[in-house]
Amino acid sequence: MISTPQAIDRFASQLPFGVKAAVYEGTRAPTVWRRDALARDYANPDALRKLASQIKQHTIEHLDQYLEQAAEKLSANGVEVLFAETSERAKELALHVMQRESVKVVVKSKSMLSEELHLNAFLQKNGIQAVETDLGEYIIQIDDDIPSHIVKPIVHKNRRDIAKSFEREGLGDYNDDPQTITHRARKHLRREFLRADCGMTGANFVSAESGRMALVTNEGNARWCVTAPRLHIAMIGIEKLVPRDRDLGVMLNLLARSAVGQQLTIYTQFLNGPRSPGKDGPEKMTVIFVDNGRSRVLGSNCNEILRCIRCGACQNVCPVYRQASGHAYRATYQGPVGAVLSPLLAGKDFAKYADLPKASSLCGACNEVCPVDIPIPDLLLRLRDKAFTEGASEAKRGTPPMAPYAWLATHPQVWRAGIKASNLGNSLPLKLSPIPAMQRWLGPRDLPPFRGGAFREWMQDRKNPPA
């Protein structure tokens, strides 16, 4: 593993792209990386993600050092820096800052961390109105729903659903034209920006070298959040750090391409402090670095998941996620990354999400598309082993255990008898079934006709040919 920034530079200098780009010689990169946006710009995009992987892994392995450095730089830039070990502490700190500054209305940019903390409900309970300003998150909020995708929170909705929600909220008569929906949202949210006392964001990356925060959006709402209100609060997971400003270039090139297939997102902001002579911005800025189980993950054998830059690429290629949808995961983070991260962040409630690592075919597509090369299939297997060794079995999750099936499958005579008995399912009158649960299950269903047994009959005839 690369242990110093200088070693990262040496590794980067060997890559065949950038100023010293060589002619692409046909190196077989993962299929999912053969995108126009990448192939046009980089001879070997897989090497770029290997570099990003090394940068992020180095950072989390030296997180104490870089957190201290980032806090010092931010403080020197005039930012109030706070640390929260738990979810409750993070919310209490945010509330304390808002109450101290007499905040009544907060406008929020999209933040998966605030979803993880269930921040909106907490603020509402304490008399502060929180308004989501990302269009997808705003629709989620007015529908009292939860996101189903890390990047595209309303991928489970269509324009007709949204038009009905807007009509219900008094934003105009039913109209499912996307442009009309967008204009209505813009008109409504602009008023919210102008009356807000505080803007809240997360951060995609934070440079420990300068304290500079990188904020990436496609709608421009984050710019309003950090300029119109007098106070800006950024709640940031401690894993969002990178060592230097130059590392931001690597991460931003990969994030946009992996998330939405763009060379660069439309709005990329760099923030390092509140308003000062010659620099615009809010009057005051507070950064809250949030742990909420991340230190525990760092000490586990699955710490590679902390490299994640929340691009959602693994969700886009996962066959299980695409069939089951995000809500099936029952947690803030869905898809392959959620199947790893959600159980780990749950801590003592690990058993509650111990089944999620099994929601995978282990096809490896998530690893191939990951811009920071997280070995997600390996992590899923480690978590399955953790669930087994800690006794977080299927039975505790309310699903049938596999032990009876294992016994049945390893006793050939019983297995054959079971196969023959199962063929009686369609011919046996339902009311004669001795098992009430079977009666309820078979009521609305017909079992397919039994088509097995031919091979065994053929083998038996072959063993005992006619005289």
Image (cartoon, rainbow, N blue to C red):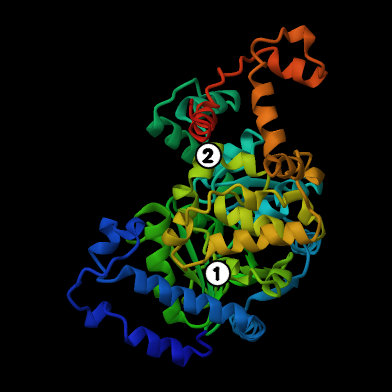
Q: Is residue 75 visible?
A: yes
Q: Secondary structure at mark 1?
A: helix
Q: Is residue 268 left or right of residue 439?
A: left
Q: Residues within 10 Å of mark 2 (few under 14, many from 20)?
A: many
Question: From mark 2 to mark 1, how far is it between C-alphas?
Answer: 25 Å
Q: Quadrant of residue 456?
A: top right
Which residue in the structure is indicated by mark 2?
154
Which residue in the structure is indicated by mark 1?
307
Closer to the camera: disc 2 or disc 1?
A: 1
Q: Quadrant of residue 381?
A: bottom right
Q: Is residue 308 left or right of residue 341?
A: left
Question: Residue at the spot x=40%, y=32% of the render?
Answer: 178
Q: Residues within 10 Å of mark 1 (few under 14, many from 20)?
A: many
Q: Is residue 31 left or right of residue 112?
A: left
Q: Secondary structure at mark 2?
A: loop
Q: Residue flagged by tag 2: what amino acid is it?
A: Ile
Give x and y (percent) for residue 206: 54, 74
Give x and y (percent) for residue 124: 76, 45
Foreground of the two, 195 or 296: 296
Q: Which mark is residue 424?
A: none
Foreground of the two, 323 or 185: 323
Give x and y (percent) for residue 286: 66, 69
In the image, residue 202 sits, relative to residue 157, either above or below, namely below
Q: Residue flagged by tag 1: what amino acid is it?
A: Arg
Foreground of the two, 428 or 136: 428
